[in-house]
Image (tube, rainbow, N blue to C red):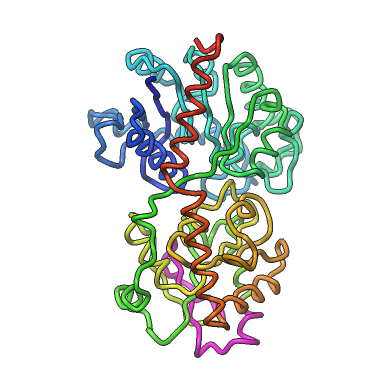
């Protein structure tokens, strides 16, 4: 059984990191696995990327070129990585034929990696691991409040379009035409994303499985809290609230504005002398923002060890996202024994057991979010119980070996079917 994973990158950001973890898990499980990427960030021999300076340079420019059709929508939402067109030509099919895999595992393949029509030319059984909603929408990565992906897209609110035949309809039609006869199995990391895929007009006829993302519980594990605070130059006598996401303070989906309101509620019941805020994934803004508590900014953290130290330094992790395919930062924090507060919505519901390893607040209610933060940090005995349950949940459900074994079994089941080739 020879498996080839396709991902835009191998280590840069949440989805590529999840794909890379699964890839390494499959190798450790004895699966003959390779990964083909547009941009190679790591040094694994099993990850294949551009080798010449010219091809590496082209890989860097492809995301910018892919976004050119968006220039026709001047009023569009300009949040980074919110929309992908996938129209640029690519030579990836020739690479795949040369590698000759038995099955292809698609991951996050945007950023201009290859056009949607190419997938139908792979002529292999496909497993598509969804890291967001893009595969079944007309181009957006998260639909927000829009449900047009359940029909045929058009009049896209992200594009600020009032035209039925807009860019989102064009991309939806391309997908619908190219993918109708695929030998495809969908895998989602959460029940919420599975339900969205099942309700979509593009994927409702394909089999859909739920396999949560895994992580390395040896890299993400409890670390002495005082040591972690010392390493990050944080006060040892303060309780630390952690918020983290790539570009999280500027992406509305990550809920930083909701957290800001929650912190204003929190300071009414908890003195700013007791608590400070730690933010990773964003640098200190040029214009100071009053969050109610002294705030430390770590910037973007590039590796698992730095992330684990940031989690360990905190008493509580807050993930106020409005939509999450899974909620990788939440599972990473739990693995480090840090309780998590989030809204009771989307993929985070699969990770957090409210009042057992964290707190699920009423969806998008900042006051209840503040209530959850206070509930976790105000009682030391309760905190230790939550911390132990947090670590136990990850060991039981979210390890890389568990995830890789579920995928290995799925691959085997697909390959023994009569129509697998």
Task: Judge from the rendering whether residue 266 lies leftward or rightward of residue 413; answer left or right.
Answer: right
The residue stretch that appears in magenta: 263-292
Residue 361 in picture, x, y percent from top left: 68, 66
Query: The N terminus appears in which quarter of the rendering?
Result: top left
Q: Is residue 175 above or below residue 11?
A: above
Q: Nearer the viewer, residue 236 or 78?
A: 236
Q: Residue at x 55, y 31 (%)?
A: 85
Q: Is residue 411 above or below residue 240?
A: above
Residue 68 in picture, x, y percent from top left: 51, 34
Q: Dominant secondary structure of the magenta stretch?
A: loop
Residue 31 in picture, x, y percent from top left: 36, 28
Q: Nearer the viewer, residue 139 or 46?
A: 46
Residue 59 in picture, x, y percent from top left: 35, 33
Q: Residue at x 37, y 13 (%)?
A: 97
Q: Nearer the viewer, residue 246 or 396?
A: 396
Q: Residue at x 32, y 13 (%)?
A: 98
Q: Residue at x 34, y 56 (%)?
A: 219
User: Picture quarter containing residue 308?
Assistant: bottom left
Magenta run includes residue 285: yes
Magenta run includes residue 226: no
Q: Is residue 29 above or below residue 245?
A: above
């Amino acid at each position: 059984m020879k498996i080839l994973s396709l991902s835009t990158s191998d280590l840069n950001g949440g989805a590529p990191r999840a794909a890379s973890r699964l890839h390494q898990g499959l190798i450790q499980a004895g699966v003959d696995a390779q990964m083909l990427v547009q941009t190679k960030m790591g040094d694994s021999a099993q990850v294949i990327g551009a080798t010449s300076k010219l091809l590496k340079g082209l890989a860097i420019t492809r995301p910018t070129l892919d976004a050119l059709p968006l220039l026709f929508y001047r009023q569009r939402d300009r949040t980074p990585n919110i929309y992908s067109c996938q129209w640029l030509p690519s030579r990836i099919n020739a690479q795949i034929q040369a590698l000759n895999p038995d099955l292809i595992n698609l991951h996050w393949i945007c950023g201009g990696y290859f056009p949607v029509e190419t997938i139908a030319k792979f002529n292999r059984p496909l497993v598509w691991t969804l890291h967001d909603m893009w595969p079944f929408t007309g181009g957006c990565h998260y639909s927000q409040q829009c449900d047009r992906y359940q029909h045929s897209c058009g009049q896209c609110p992200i594009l600020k379009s009032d035209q039925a035949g807009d860019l989102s309809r064009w991309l939806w039609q391309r997908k619908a035409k190219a993918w109708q006869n695929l030998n495809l199995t969908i895998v989602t990391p959460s029940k919420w994303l599975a339900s969205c895929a099942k309700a979509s007009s593009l994927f409702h006829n394909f089999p859909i499985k739920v396999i949560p993302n895994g992580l390395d519980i040896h890299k993400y594990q409890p670390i002495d809290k005082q040591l972690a605070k010392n390493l990050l130059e944080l006060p040892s006598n303060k309780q630390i609230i952690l918020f983290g996401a790539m570009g999280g303070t500027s992406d509305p989906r990550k809920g930083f504005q909701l957290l800001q309101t929650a912190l204003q509620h929190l300071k009414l019941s908890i003195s700013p002398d007791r608590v400070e805020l730690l933010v990773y994934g964003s640098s200190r803004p040029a214009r100071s923002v009053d969050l109610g508590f002294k705030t430390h900014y770590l910037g973007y953290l590039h590796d698992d060890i730095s992330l684990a130290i940031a989690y360990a330094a905190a008493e509580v992790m807050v993930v106020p996202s409005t939509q999450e395919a899974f909620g990788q930062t939440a599972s990473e924090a739990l693995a480090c024994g840090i309780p998590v507060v989030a809204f009771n919505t989307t993929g985070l519901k699969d990770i957090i057991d409210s009042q057992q390893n964290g707190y699920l607040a009423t969806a998008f209610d900042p006051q209840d979010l503040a209530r959850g933060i206070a509930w976790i940090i105000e009682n030391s005995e309760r905190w230790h119980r939550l911390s132990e349950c947090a670590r136990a949940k990850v060991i039981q459900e979210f390890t890389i070996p568990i995830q890789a074994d579920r995928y290995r079994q799925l691959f085997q089941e697909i390959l023994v079917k009569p129509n697998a080739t």
